[in-house]
Amino acid sequence: MICCFTGHRDIPPEHMAVLPQILDYEIERLIVCGVTEFRGGGALGFDTLAELKVLEKKKKYDFLALKLILPCRDQAASWSERNRAIYNYIASEADSVEYAYERYNSNCMHKRNRMLADGSDFCLAYLTSNSGGTAYTCNYAKKIGVSIINTADKITIS
């Protein structure tokens, strides 16, 4: 079984304080349910957190695969040096890297998002807004029968 990730780039600090633990729990639960492949889109924020968590889990479960489906080869060109270093680390540790397009264009993010969802059984998301790329991906995934798990719904701040 396959699970893709989608989520916002900006995560409020109070959510960031608990999101790694929620991700750990949900990824572990998906592995127990039979997920062996995780797909990430390489974006900052939630994607990066989820991809790093899968790389951590691969140390425990050698059968796991992390597949990156990226919008274009120059996705991280304008990012900070630190963010590019994390991006490059994840790409170097992933089992495969695929690009929607060679270069950035106005359609590359949408195509990447559809490629992530196509063939997935689950979509582990961080969705707090009904607009934008994450909402688009979740709506597309639902439309094609992918089960959505929204980590934002599991956050409780006391």
Image: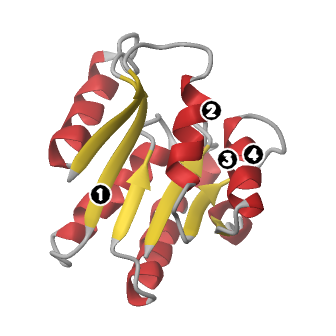
Instruction: From the image, tell me which residue sits under label 2.
Output: 110
Instruction: From the image, tell me which residue sits under label 1.
Output: 66
Is any part of residue 16 visible from this angle? Answer: no
Say what secondary structure mark 2 lies in: helix
Q: Disc 3 to disc 1, how far (Cα)?
A: 19 Å
Instruction: From the image, tell me which residue sits under label 3.
Output: 137
Instruction: From the image, tell me which residue sits under label 4.
Output: 135
Say which mark, if any, is on residue 2: none
| Residue type, mark 2 in image | His
Mark 4 in CB contact with mark 3 (< 8 angstroms): yes
Q: Residue at x 16, y 40 (%)?
A: 92
Specify the farthest residue to the right.
130
| Residue type, mark 1 in image | Leu
Q: With 10 as the anchor, is 68 left or right in this view?
A: left
Q: Nearer the viewer, mark 2 or mark 1?
A: 2
Instruction: Say which of 143 and 129 sits in front.
Output: 143
Q: Disc 4 to disc 3, how far (Cα)?
A: 5 Å
Classify 49 as above or below 112.
below
Mark 1 in CB contact with mark 4 (< 8 angstroms): no
Q: Residue at x 51, y 54 (%)?
A: 5
Identify the image quadrant of residue 154: bottom right
| Residue type, mark 3 in image | Thr
Say what secondary structure mark 4 lies in: helix
| Disc nearer the start of the sequence (2/4) | 2
Q: Nearer the viewer, mark 2 or mark 4?
A: 2
Quarter the N terminus occupies: bottom left
